[in-house]
Amino acid sequence: MPRSVNSVAKRARRKKVLKQAKGYFGRRKNVWTVAKNAVDKAMLYAYRDRKTKKRNFRSLWIMRINAGARMHGMSYSQFIGKVKAAGIELNRKVLADLAMNHPDAFEAIVKKVK
């Protein structure tokens, strides 16, 4: 019995990986084994950093809220504690945006919770 191979699927898989490696430098973009390793590593980084991005943004929002709160004589932890106690349901993303771009609105929130 003759040997059966599926070259169509094999070529499609390789084309898919090489297409994903488009824009890479040197052999990483056109040599199958090198491109495959580079794309695999890139996918790992992409997966990991989608999680890291969320952490980084939350950290940035906390820094901005802290800076805004300290301008009004409060620390971040005191401000967040009082916001929760007052029943204000604004998340850190919105509070950070108010602190950065709408200081008068942020000041109104600070006065309300004091």
Image (tube, helix red, strand yellow):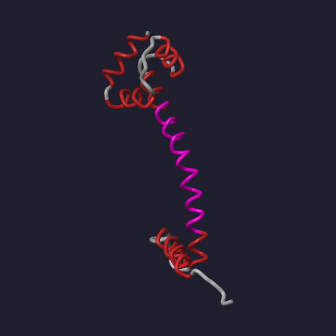
Q: Quadrant of the N terminus?
A: bottom right
* Residue name at image x 32 percent, y 21 percent: 105
* Residue name at image x 55 percent, y 66 percent: 39
Residue 4 occupies quadrant: bottom right
* Residue 56 location (% of width, % of height): 52, 41
Up-down relation of residue 66 to residue 108 (above or below): below
* Residue 86 location (% of width, % of height): 45, 11
Residue 52 occupies quadrant: top right
Up-down relation of residue 32 to residue 91 (above or below): below
Which residue, as the protein is rendered here, is positioned at the far front? Answer: 1
Count up the numbered dots: 0
- Looking at the image, which is closer to me, 6 or 50? 6
* Residue 9 location (% of width, % of height): 54, 76
- Looking at the image, which is closer to me, 25 or 29? 29
Give the magenta part as a residue range: 38-62
Which residue, as the protein is rendered here, is positioned at the far right? Answer: 1
Up-down relation of residue 114 to residue 76 (above or below): above
Q: Is residue 36 magenta?
A: no
Q: Quadrant of the C terminus?
A: top left
Up-down relation of residue 2 to residue 71 (above or below): below
* Residue name at image x 66 percent, y 90 percent: 2
* Residue 101 location (% of width, % of height): 32, 31
- Looking at the image, which is closer to me, 35 or 114? 35
Name the dominant secondary structure of the magenta segment: helix
Q: Is residue 52 magenta?
A: yes
* Residue name at image x 46 percent, y 21 percent: 70
